[in-house]
Amino acid sequence: MKEQNIKIDLATTKKQKPAADQLVFGKQFTDHMFVADYTEGKGWHDKRIVPYEPITLDPSAMIFHYGQTVFEGLKAYMGQDGSIRLFRPEKNMERLNKSSNRLSMPKVDEALALEALKKLITIDKDWIPNAEGTSLYIRPFMISTESNLSVSPSKKYRFMIILSPVGAYYKEGINPVKILVENEYIRAVAGGTGTAKTAGNYAASLKAQEEADQKGFSQVLWLDGVEKKFVEEVGSMNIFFKINGEIVTPALNGSILEGVTRNSIIQVLKHWGMRVKERKISMKEVQEAHHNGQLEEAFGTGTAAVISPIGELNWEGEEMVVNEGKTGEISKKLYETLTGIQLGKLEDPFDWVVELPKESSVK
Amino acid sequence: MKEQNIKIDLATTKKQKPAADQLVFGKQFTDHMFVADYTEGKGWHDKRIVPYEPITLDPSAMIFHYGQTVFEGLKAYMGQDGSIRLFRPEKNMERLNKSSNRLSMPKVDEALALEALKKLITIDKDWIPNAEGTSLYIRPFMISTESNLSVSPSKKYRFMIILSPVGAYYKEGINPVKILVENEYIRAVAGGTGTAKTAGNYAASLKAQEEADQKGFSQVLWLDGVEKKFVEEVGSMNIFFKINGEIVTPALNGSILEGVTRNSIIQVLKHWGMRVKERKISMKEVQEAHHNGQLEEAFGTGTAAVISPIGELNWEGEEMVVNEGKTGEISKKLYETLTGIQLGKLEDPFDWVVELPKESSVK
């Protein structure tokens, strides 16, 4: 699919934009969306930017029954300099295709998807909030649309990009959370779909999250599905520990999602000259480090929060308070560095930021 | 929800019914469908039987992103005596609720769902094919419908029942299949969603199925996700072995789907006075039984095929031909017994068949 083939149909009426203090994550959407359809034998067709509107599908559409779907999540930031910035968007498109492959879904043209995304954002640029910590959340996703109850890969798909203005994740400053180490439910195992960003992983996680909520925890920490010993992820974020001066994060093992923020954090830490290890890490080791006073920091990383400091880990009834329940020095510095780069306030030595042309206009 | 509260809106135009030899599984649907909506705090509402029509959902509907969905599959049979029969439909509604619980979805009123199903079938009864081996496939399913990109249980759901006339599974007699024992991909582990009939399990299975197809196999046999040693399921069916005169099937272990056909087969075999064991069974044991000449039969069980005999198992390159690649005696007898009971041709000592009133009419 070529960019010039994107048909643009602008909305004749515009919705009212929410006030900065009334932004709710993922409930308000901009005036337009990008849509492309795929038919086996024909490939991607009917690429279009159209007014945001409902999808109409047959009740037998395969998405409702056999769940072939993949998605991505990234953000556009409005800098104080009036520039619109994306953070490593090519990594999201690359991962979208990795996810699609696991789900037996077709690839999208990554360069074209990125062009479509930029064009869509440019059209809806007035929707990007510019208050401290706010951004425009971008949700590219693909669903199976063939009407067919046979268990087989769909022959038809729809790829869409929708945009949602979102408020600050931390309204009163970055805030450590209480985490429950999950011993019953499993998120994923190697050979499953854990490395793919696909609906089934999230559907599977809700029960554990609900039960953790009821016990007063913000998120669960997932253990491996084989031995229930090794740390995998926290909620829908990757996890890092600072143990005795060294940063440790679970290695990509076939069941963990390869986070773009995770990858960025590792690079930033190395750039700072810190020791970072991607390896297996057991809860036993985390517990021992805590007992020895060497568990200095723990934090989750993801697109939504960037850094989510962990103030307490509860494992089999044992409360392990990390860094006196306060945000650690490294967590804070990483948060400031990443968000600084994203907003164009800090230098970008990694060439991560993609700035949209300022004077872009759409005919 | 009470039966009398089901609003009925009959189709003014009827679709043409496919000829008996042109029935394709899951692609043709009857004139009507049952729909009910759920809203948190309000419960199930707007129960209705309406003309079969598309669903309209916001692009941010949670089903497209976080995959909360459960479904069931069962059949209605038109007997030569003109009676319409269902086979243990209450088991499907019971399992639907078990699945919903795992996916943090609301329960349906099982009795009411069954009444809705019977009413719908009665309205569309002319769609039930009556040629040998044909039936009306019934697909109850529930999807999350709230517009919200937060990872959390949806506050809105839709429950639907759709009907599809289906042809004979075995067009030229019951036919043994070649099965590949899957060593790379994993269907489910205990703590995951393997016991629930939910989209994510099927989405996860497609890749292995595609690769098996390319190698000339009909289905894969799934091993456990922890040790990759123990037999779990075959394709989307449960599996049975006859080893040295005894019938063995994997015990319900927290990752296997509890098949209604599986349960029925066990009861029939016990009724016949046969030895049946539900226990762990390793591929090593199956292989040794084959080497010793004691692997007498192997078959899958499920709603679609009832019994699917296995003619060959391929494990790590070793071809194990079962019963000379022919349908075994027990497999055949079970198939004839189950289908005989379902069609009202044989006595039903278990009280499994639910016969619809012959003179039912709808105003």
Image (cartoon, coloured by chain):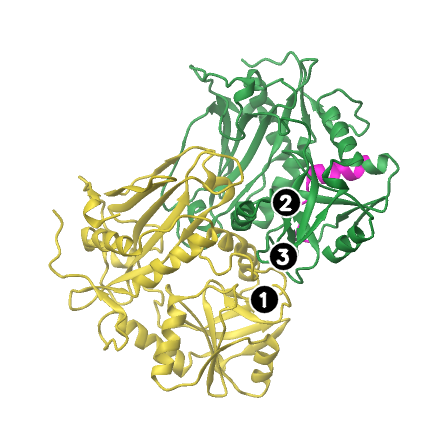
Chain colours: A yellow, B green
Q: Residue at x 59, y 13 (%)?
A: B361
Question: Considering only vertical position in the picture, is B316 above or below A155?
Answer: below
Give residue A237's mark. Answer: none
- At which x and y percent is residue A279? 52, 76
Q: Which amino acid lies under the numbered mark 1 shown in the image of this protein?
A: Asp
Q: Residue at x 68, y 17 (%)?
A: B79
Mark 1–mark 2 distance (CA, rounded to whole Å) = 25 Å
Mark 1 crowdedness (10 Å alpha carbons): few <14, some 14-19, many ≥20 = many
Disc 1: which residue? A224
Which secondary structure lies at badge 1?
loop
Give residue B98's mark. Answer: 2
Q: Quadrant of residue B54?
A: top left
Question: Considering only vertical position in the picture, is A224 above or below B292?
Answer: below
Disc 3: which residue? B189
- At which x and y percent is residue A214? 56, 60
Which secondary structure lies at badge 2?
helix
Q: Which amino acid lies under the numbered mark 2 shown in the image of this protein?
A: Lys
Query: Are both tags, 3 and 1, on one chain?
Result: no
Mark 3–mark 1 distance (CA, rounded to whole Å) = 11 Å
Query: Are both tags, 2 and 3, on one chain?
Result: yes
Q: In the depicted view, which residue is nearer to us: B66 or B301?
A: B301
Chain that bears disc 2: B
- Quarter of the image with the N terminus of chain B is top right
- At which x and y percent is residue B325? 72, 40
Q: Which amino acid lies under the numbered mark 3 shown in the image of this protein?
A: Val
